[in-house]
Image (spheres, rainbow, N blue to C red):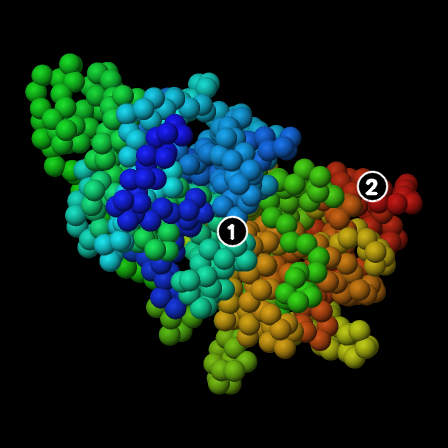
């Protein structure tokens, strides 16, 4: 907009008593008492909604999702690259539509006038779009090294329409007070600079309804938002903002994922649609659509403000129709997509030169069958808790997750390759029980790791039903005697139940069934497992001989690396880590488990939730050891329930472990069973080692075997002593 046009618009607004909204207007998550109004749904890595069989219009969201992408815009600000994110969607094979402000540098209204003027004039350097489900910066997306195989560069198609449309976008709140939107003509069409992708869908406009009872949704990518910024944006809306933040973070699986925000329309007037879909910044430029209709949209979501609610530019707005008609429509496109377009074109009495008749078509409604069965899922629990060490709610140590390619997105991260090269061997274990009184199977989960081409090692309590020590004695006895029905392992990065893992319908291509190799060693090892705290007070561990070896019932996977034991180092300065899958935990349970250990448990929960990307992912928990002997290793790696059975390892050594992580207590801290414990050596020697295995892996095993003066029959003539780990 030209300066003189902007002055005319401001004058017109003052005459009409229209209040301009600032550029910092926030998206809105509507709520009651911190509980989200509406629904926030995410997709699995296969763009499916898993674990919600009763979700209405599930197939609509799934079939629409491929056309939605996250937009990344690069600016050069005083010599430094700065990236801004939003959402866009495919409207033609070579075209993306979004909101104009998505590719404009955000103006800080609290800055000096000179700074604001500079920000307004900043032009983008590069624009990219990414259509994947998880678009987390630093995990999936490395903005310092753009991967062109999954990131597609875009450029603007131009804004000649600004010369034709000079009036501000006006809309009103529930009291009738009128407001003007901050960005003039807030719509943008972008074209691919290179070859467009061929595996994404195209979305089509449809005429909105005035039905405030039916579900609508926004599909987009909420940006990462920390608690402090969230509180600033929402300061007028809720007293318990931490609860709301936790709920939104959980429902969106840690932000930055392709998300469906479902809610209702509140008003459709003057070609602007007001709605209560619970969105966050980053969803701007996404579609606003009716849940019943797949691959259709009724508006372009722009954002919202506390005064007005969320708004979308309707596809019936003259600006939208002008842009769509001039940039998207041509005779061939209409001919190829006549069925999807005709009802919309009829609204404008539009007939292309290639179409001699006008056919009115009612929008098609998809009928989705609703599943009614519910799955009872109990997270692995015992009286002994995992420990996340902290100071004032800030985690001591580090919690790191992998992206979908089992890589760590931080290129300069210390020992990065060690964690990455080890990760394929670690999997999440799921154990199924049939419990008296429960209509559905009960599932528990933990971690295990690959120690031979047909064997997995874990902690014994991972496959034992958790005993509720507060239940009647008869119930406790029944729980102790429960035998597992099925055991599976999954080696993927994201093992979220209900999103990636559907326990009602096991995917046998990704989930491998296991069975126990037996526990004959229980007859040889009768002593309790003793752990000392820092004051040398001894404690006995709740599970005797807490080690288990499982074998594959079918064909083992062929793309998993084996990891090997190595002698622990009594060095309290070097980094160690646990690799495992923290289970999902609610805030109330977290506070109950950690009572007395932190004043600000909500802050600690928020930090751990963010660092683990919403739990249930393959996670590296980095910390220091506090005590090492030949049986037990005490450590301060920040773990949660579900990591039990994973490896404790030295960060410098890839594909090696020094112990099996068992868990922890407030009294003892976290502990691992050392690979030098007589129990571990007996189990490993009996169930894992054989002459062929040793011969094939001598380089990895020799130093460990030398510790026990062990020479297999095939090497009896020569004993090779190595001075250090290989």
Residue at position x 84%, y 45% in the image: 725
Q: Is residue 366 visible?
A: no
Q: Which mark is residue 701?
A: none
Left or right side of 85 for 336: left
Q: Position of residue 644 (x, y in %)?
A: 62, 61
Which quadrant would residue 200 be assigned to in this image?
top left
For the point 55% across and 72% down, which residue is it?
591
Task: Judge by depth and name the residue closer to the eye, 519 or 121.
Answer: 121
- Tell us which disc is closer to us: 1 or 2: 1
Q: Are marks 1 and 2 in contact (CB under 8 Å)?
A: no
Task: Report which quarter residue 89 is drawn in.
Answer: top left
Question: In the orientation shown, which residue stands out farthest toward the bottom?
Answer: 473
Q: Is label 2 in a helix, a strand or a loop? A: loop
Q: Residue at x 85, y 47 (%)?
A: 703
Q: Is residue 210 visible?
A: yes
Quarter-wise, where is residue 188 in the image? top left
**Within 10 angstroms of label 1, few (less than 14), some, or many (20 or more) residues?**
some
In front of the other: 686 or 489: 489
Residue 30 versus residue 130 in the image, above or below: below
> Which callout, 1 or 2, points at the residue further toward the start of the chain?
1
Could you tell me which secondary element the residue under label 1 belongs to? loop
In this view, 476 is above or below 126: below
Q: Is residue 176 left or right of residue 130?
A: left
Question: Where in the figure is residue 59, as x and y percent of width and height?
Answer: 29, 43
- Mark number for residue 225? 1
* Residue drawn at 32 percent across, 39 percent down: 11
State whether residue 103 is above or below residue 551: above
> Mark 2 = which residue?
726
């Amino acid at each position: 907009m030209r300066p003189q046009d902007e002055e005319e618009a401001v004058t017109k607004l003052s005459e009409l008593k229209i209040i301009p909204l600032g550029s910092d207007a926030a998206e809105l998550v509507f709520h009651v008492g911190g509980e989200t109004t509406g629904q926030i749904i995410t997709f699995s890595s296969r763009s499916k909604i898993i674990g919600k069989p009763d979700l209405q219009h599930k197939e609509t969201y799934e079939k629409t999702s491929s056309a939605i992408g996250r937009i990344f815009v690069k600016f050069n600000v005083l010599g430094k690259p700065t990236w801004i994110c939003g959402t866009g969607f495919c409207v033609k094979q070579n075209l993306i539509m979004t909101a104009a402000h998505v590719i404009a540098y955000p103006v800080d209204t609290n800055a000096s006038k000179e700074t604001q003027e500079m920000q307004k004039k900043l032009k983008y350097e590069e624009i990219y779009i990414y259509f994947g489900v998880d678009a987390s910066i630093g995990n999936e997306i490395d903005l310092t090294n753009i991967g062109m195989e999954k990131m597609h560069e875009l450029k603007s198609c131009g804004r000649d329409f600004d010369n034709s449309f000079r009036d501000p976008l006006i809309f009103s709140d529930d009291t009738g007070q009128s407001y003007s939107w901050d960005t003039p003509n807030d719509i943008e069409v972008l074209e691919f600079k290179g070859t467009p992708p061929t595996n994404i869908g195209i979305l089509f406009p449809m005429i909105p309804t005035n039905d405030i009872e039916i579900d609508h949704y926004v599909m987009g990518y909420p940006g990462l938002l920390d608690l402090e910024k969230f509180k600033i944006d929402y300061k007028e809306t809720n007293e318990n903002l931490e609860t709301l933040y936790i709920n939104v973070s959980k429902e969106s699986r840690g932000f930055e994922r392709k998300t469906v925000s479902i809610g209702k329309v509140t008003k459709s007037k003057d070609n602007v649609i007001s709605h209560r879909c619970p969105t966050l910044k980053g969803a701007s430029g996404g579609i606003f659509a009716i849940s019943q209709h797949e691959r259709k949209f009724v508006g372009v979501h722009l954002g919202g403000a506390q005064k007005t609610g969320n708004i979308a530019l309707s596809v019936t707005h003259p600006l939208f129709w002008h842009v769509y008609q001039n940039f998207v429509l041509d005779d061939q496109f209409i001919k190829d997509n006549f069925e999807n377009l005709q009802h919309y074109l009829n609204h404008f009495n539009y007939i292309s030169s290639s179409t001699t008749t006008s056919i009115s078509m009612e929008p098609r409604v998809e009928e989705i069958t609703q599943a009614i069965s519910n799955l009872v899922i109990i997270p692995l629990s015992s009286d002994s808790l995992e420990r996340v060490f902290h100071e004032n709610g800030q985690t001591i140590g580090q919690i790191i997750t992998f992206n979908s390619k089992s890589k760590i997105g931080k290129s300069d991260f210390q020992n990065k390759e060690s964690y990455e090269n080890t990760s394929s061997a670690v999997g999440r274990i799921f154990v199924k029980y049939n419990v008296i009184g429960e209509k559905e199977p009960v599932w528990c989960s933990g971690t295990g790791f690959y120690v031979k081409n047909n064997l997995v090692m874990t902690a014994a309590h991972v496959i034992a039903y958790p005993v509720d020590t507060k239940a009647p004695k008869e119930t406790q006895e029944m729980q102790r005697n429960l035998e597992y029905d099925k055991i599976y392992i999954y080696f993927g990065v994201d093992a979220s139940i209900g999103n990636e893992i559907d326990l009602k319908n096991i995917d046998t291509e990704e989930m491998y069934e296991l069975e126990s190799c037996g526990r004959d060693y229980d007859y040889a090892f009768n002593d309790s497992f003793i752990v000392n705290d820092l004051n040398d007070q001894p404690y006995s561990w709740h599970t005797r001989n807490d080690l288990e070896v499982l074998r594959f019932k079918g064909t083992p996977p062929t793309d998993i690396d084996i990891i090997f034991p190595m002698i622990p180092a009594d060095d309290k300065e070097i980094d160690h880590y646990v690799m495992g899958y923290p289970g999902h935990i609610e805030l109330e349970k977290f506070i109950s488990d950690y009572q007395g250990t932190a004043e600000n448990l909500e802050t600690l929960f928020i930090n751990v939730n963010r660092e683990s990307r919403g739990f249930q992912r393959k996670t590296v928990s980095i910390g220091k050891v506090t005590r090492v002997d030949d049986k037990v290793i005490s450590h301060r790696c920040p773990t949660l329930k579900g990591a039990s059975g994973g490896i404790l390892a030295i960060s410098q050594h890839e594909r090696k472990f020094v112990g099996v992580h068992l868990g922890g207590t407030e009294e003892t801290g976290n502990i691992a069973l050392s690979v030098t414990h007589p129990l571990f050596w007996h189990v490993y020697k009996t169930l894992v080692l054989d002459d062929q295995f040793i011969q094939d892996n001598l380089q990895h095993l020799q130093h460990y075997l030398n510790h026990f003066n062990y020479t297999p029959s095939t090497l009896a003539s020569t004993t090779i002593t190595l001075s250090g780990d290989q």
